Image (spheres, grey):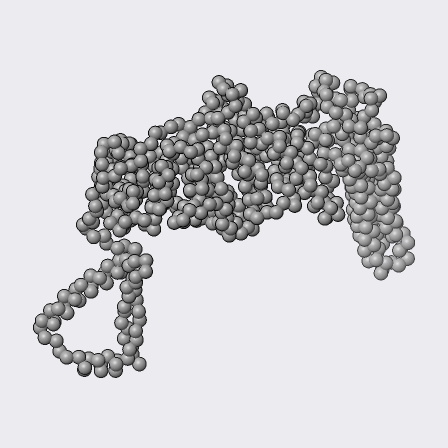
């Protein structure tokens, strides 16, 4: 049965009001035919009205279709209210200043002095005590398996922190490379102050809070360090009037219910922290969680984000000159009204949900002239509309719109042709890529002062100390360490320091190392091959397992006269052992002697010599026996009486195999696990001499024997000539045997 379909749609006009858009209704042809019969023919007037309704419905359908496709056509005439009169808060702008002790007045404090304001002896001792307790508890539960644990001291903790900061300065694919000793990769001097095992052990048992402490929130695992750093940041610096509030993200992709995900962000997943900053200085902060509410004082009428902003602002010094800048995530009319009642200014971008009047709700694809201005006052808060490359909506209590004092000249860049409002904006610039234009002061102040938190993120991204960790509080600790360093760096800059960020961190690292190091630790001296006598004689490297009375001739340090000598109390020479420890040569310490003269592979060549002797000689003997045997068998069919005389070539071929056996046995008797490379080469030469000579003799005996036996059966006089030829062929193998015996006697002269 055929069906008709009538399309009716649903379109979302407001937050709670919907208009029909798509609905599919199927009816049969019979149903439509019955409805047509019941309808009366309309008159002319009704026909005109229906035509007009059809045109209007057609326009509505086209508009709804454009909305569904995201290409809604904006009305050509958008009426916006004129900029209103507004009385902003009047405040005195003051700069930020440092509150250090009088001892640092007029001087630039060193990096370590500023760092110790945050990581005091009390905090370091607290971490040391809790780390040792946690290590003891864990090792007791596990039955004290694994590496032995030695109680950590304050000096070790300071060294561990210094190495952690150093790792942030020198990025490496793996932590193991910090303790690299190979010449093919960089070596790091700081690795001499703590070995890799100890560093990883401290990281394994590192604990800030007490092991038995009750943890209500995950960030309590870094208490009391978190609260101490926050209080210290507020104590030693008073921020300027213009501060910003924004969210920070600490990268962490482990299994945790407290992390959040934010698409289209530089850090898409991690721990979120709300911070109040002044041009990069983190004045105060508060961690947040996806499953736990932040423990702060609630203000009636404010949202959760509004209460967080109010909590951060309330920690500022009690002064009416502060102005808070924030983005549209926090901005709302009620929050700005609350700050105005407290005498605190506020400014920020705003979303439609934040309280933008309907008169200023313009579609983002609207085509308006550049610098179109409008505004509405809502309860003592000015909502500003300004047309740039797209519509910009802001909210402020410290700016106005009417008057030259609320405008500034700034250099603006020409937008791209694909920009939303690019056609109209590019006409202002003409052919100039940049042009000085007049814009609203509220726009300029927001652009200048909103980047306080972004400066912190930028500085932290350069030399971040964060490392891979499984526990969800580790990223917060690394963030606290980076925040402390950045705050110290900015304080030093305020006091007149000329160090760059990298130089400041490097100075801090070695300041921490020098503060806990009582002796000067030096690296072992590495000597390149060839070893020079004058370099070795004055060396101060440590001699492994050598007593005070032990002496060694200087001529043994040179390559020309360096020859191993076997001793009962020592299996390797001093130079070879030292070079092996410094990775200058390869030496397996499980074998008695390993050096350039007596390497571990020296016996291999002797074994190959013995194998070559027996294998090649047997190969020649087998060929001679088989070849002569074929001729003997063929001759014995016709002359069986000559079989015994024809056996002579077979006997001579078998003797060749005996030569190889003798040499192989002699070489095998000289095998030793500690043998020189010279002896191995001699034995290889001896085996090849007798083996190849025996193979050649066996080929000759076989060929001559086959032909000679057949011929002597027909002509007996040829038998004597055959015997002479066989003798000279056999002598070839004898020559190889003599050379092999002589060479083997020389192999015994070399010893390790």
Quarter of the image for the C terminus: give it.
top right
Query: Between 96 and 490, which is closer to the camera in this rendering?
Result: 96
Q: Residue at coordinates 37% horizontally, 39% vertically from top-left?
A: 342
Q: Position of residue 543 (x, y in %)?
A: 77, 25
Q: Where is residue 679 in the image (x, y as percent from the top left)?
A: 81, 33
Q: State left or right for residue 703 relative to residue 495.
A: right
Q: Residue at coordinates 20% horizontally, 52% vertically from top-left?
A: 75
Query: Where 407 falls versus 374 (above or below)?
Result: above
Splitting the image into 4 quarters, where does residue 67 fall?
bottom left
Quarter of the image for the N terminus: give it.
bottom left
Splitting the image into 4 quarters, where does residue 313 fall?
top left
Q: State left or right for residue 652 relative to residue 349.
A: right
Query: Where 224 falls versus 654 (above or below)?
Result: above
Q: Residue at coordinates 84% horizontally, 38% vertically from top-left?
A: 671
Q: How many labels does the image show?
A: 0
Query: Between 554 and 516, which is closer to the camera in this rendering?
Result: 516
Splitting the image into 4 quarters, where does residue 547 fall?
top right
Judged from this view, the residue extending furthest toward the left is 44
Query: Between 336 and 712, which is closer to the camera in this rendering?
Result: 336
Q: Residue at coordinates 14% horizontally, 79% vertically from top-left?
A: 40
Asked if one can make out residue 435 in the rendered structure from this viewpoint, the answer is: no
Q: Position of residue 129 (x, y in %)?
A: 67, 37
Asked if one can make out residue 509 in the rendered structure from this viewpoint, the answer is: yes
């Amino acid at each position: 049965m055929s069906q008709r379909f009538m399309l009716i749609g649903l379109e979302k006009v407001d937050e709670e009001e919907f208009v029909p858009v798509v609905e599919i209704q199927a009816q049969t042809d019979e149903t439509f035919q019955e409805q047509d019969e019941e309808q009366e023919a309309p008159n002319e007037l009704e026909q005109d009205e229906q035509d007009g309704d059809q045109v209007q419905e057609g326009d509505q359908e086209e508009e709804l279709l454009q909305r569904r496709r995201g290409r809604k056509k904006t009305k050509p005439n958008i009426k916006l209210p004129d900029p209103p009169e507004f009385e902003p808060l009047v405040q005195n702008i003051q700069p930020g200043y440092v509150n250090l002790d009088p001892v640092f007045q007029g001087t630039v404090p060193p990096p370590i002095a500023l760092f110790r304001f945050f990581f005091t002896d009390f905090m370091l001792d607290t971490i040391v005590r809790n780390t040792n307790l946690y290590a003891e508890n864990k090792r007791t539960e596990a039955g004290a398996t694994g590496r032995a644990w030695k109680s950590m001291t304050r000096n070790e903790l300071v060294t561990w922190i210094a190495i952690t900061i150093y790792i942030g300065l020198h990025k490496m694919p793996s932590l193991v490379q910090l303790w690299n000793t190979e010449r093919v990769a960089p070596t790091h001097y700081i690795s001499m102050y703590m070995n890799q095992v100890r560093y990883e052990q401290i990281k394994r048992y590192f604990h800030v809070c007490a092991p038995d402490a009750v943890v209500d929130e995950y960030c309590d695992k870094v208490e009391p360090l978190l609260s101490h750093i926050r209080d210290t940041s507020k104590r030693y610096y008073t921020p300027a009037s213009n501060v910003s509030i924004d969210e920070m993200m600490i990268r962490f992709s482990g299994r945790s219910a407290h992390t959040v995900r934010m698409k289209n962000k530089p850090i898409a997943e991690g721990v979120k922290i709300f911070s109040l900053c002044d041009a990069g200085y983190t004045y105060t902060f508060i961690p947040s969680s996806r499953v736990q509410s932040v423990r702060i004082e609630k203000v009636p009428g404010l949202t959760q984000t509004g209460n967080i902003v109010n909590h951060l602002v309330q920690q500022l010094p009690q002064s009416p000159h502060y102005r808070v800048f924030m983005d549209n995530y926090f901005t709302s009319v009620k929050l700005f009204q609350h700050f105005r009642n407290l005498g605190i200014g506020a400014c920020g971008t705003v979303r439609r949900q934040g309280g933008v009047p309907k008169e200023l709700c313009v579609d983002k694809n609207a085509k308006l002239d550049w610098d179109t201005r409008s505004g509405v006052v809502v309860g003592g808060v000015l909502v500003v509309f300004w047309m740039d490359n797209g519509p910009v909506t802001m909210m402020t209590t410290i700016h106005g719109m009417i008057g030259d004092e609320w405008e500034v000249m700034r250099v603006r860049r020409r937008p791209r042709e694909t920009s939303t409002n690019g056609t109209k904006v590019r006409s202002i610039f003409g052919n100039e890529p940049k042009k000085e234009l007049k814009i609203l002061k509220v726009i300029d102040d927001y652009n200048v002062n909103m980047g306080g938190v972004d400066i912190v993120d930028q500085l932290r991204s350069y030399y971040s100390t964060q490392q891979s960790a499984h526990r969800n509080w580790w990223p917060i600790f690394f963030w606290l360490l980076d925040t402390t360093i950045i705050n110290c760096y900015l304080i030093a800059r305020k006091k007149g320091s000329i160090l760059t960020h990298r130089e400041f961190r490097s100075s801090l690292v070695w300041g921490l190392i020098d503060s806990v190091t009582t002796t000067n630790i030096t690296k072992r001296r590495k000597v390149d091959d060839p070893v020079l006598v004058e370099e070795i004689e004055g060396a101060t490297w440590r001699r492994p397992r050598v007593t005070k009375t032990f002496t060694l001739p200087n001529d043994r340090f040179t390559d020309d006269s360096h020859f191993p000598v076997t001793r009962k109390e020592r299996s390797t020479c001093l130079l070879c052992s030292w070079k092996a420890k410094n990775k200058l040569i390869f030496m397996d310490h499980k074998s008695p002697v390993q050096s350039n003269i007596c390497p571990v592979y020296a016996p291999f060549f002797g074994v190959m010599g013995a194998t070559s002797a027996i294998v090649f000689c047997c190969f020649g003997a087998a060929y001679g026996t088989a070849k002569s045997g074929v001729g003997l068998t063929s001759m014995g069919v016709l002359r069986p009486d000559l079989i015994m005389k024809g056996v002579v070539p077979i006997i001579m071929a078998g003797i060749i195999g005996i030569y190889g056996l003798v040499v192989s046995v002699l070489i095998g008797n000289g095998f030793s696990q500690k043998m020189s490379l010279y002896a191995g080469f001699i034995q290889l030469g001896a085996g090849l001499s007798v083996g190849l000579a025996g193979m050649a003799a066996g080929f000759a005996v076989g060929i001559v024997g086959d032909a000679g036996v057949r011929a002597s059966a027909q002509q007996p006089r040829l038998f004597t000539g055959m015997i002479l030829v066989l003798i000279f062929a056999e002598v070839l193998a004898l020559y190889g045997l003599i050379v092999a015996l002589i060479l083997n006697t020389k192999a015994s002269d070399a010893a390790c």
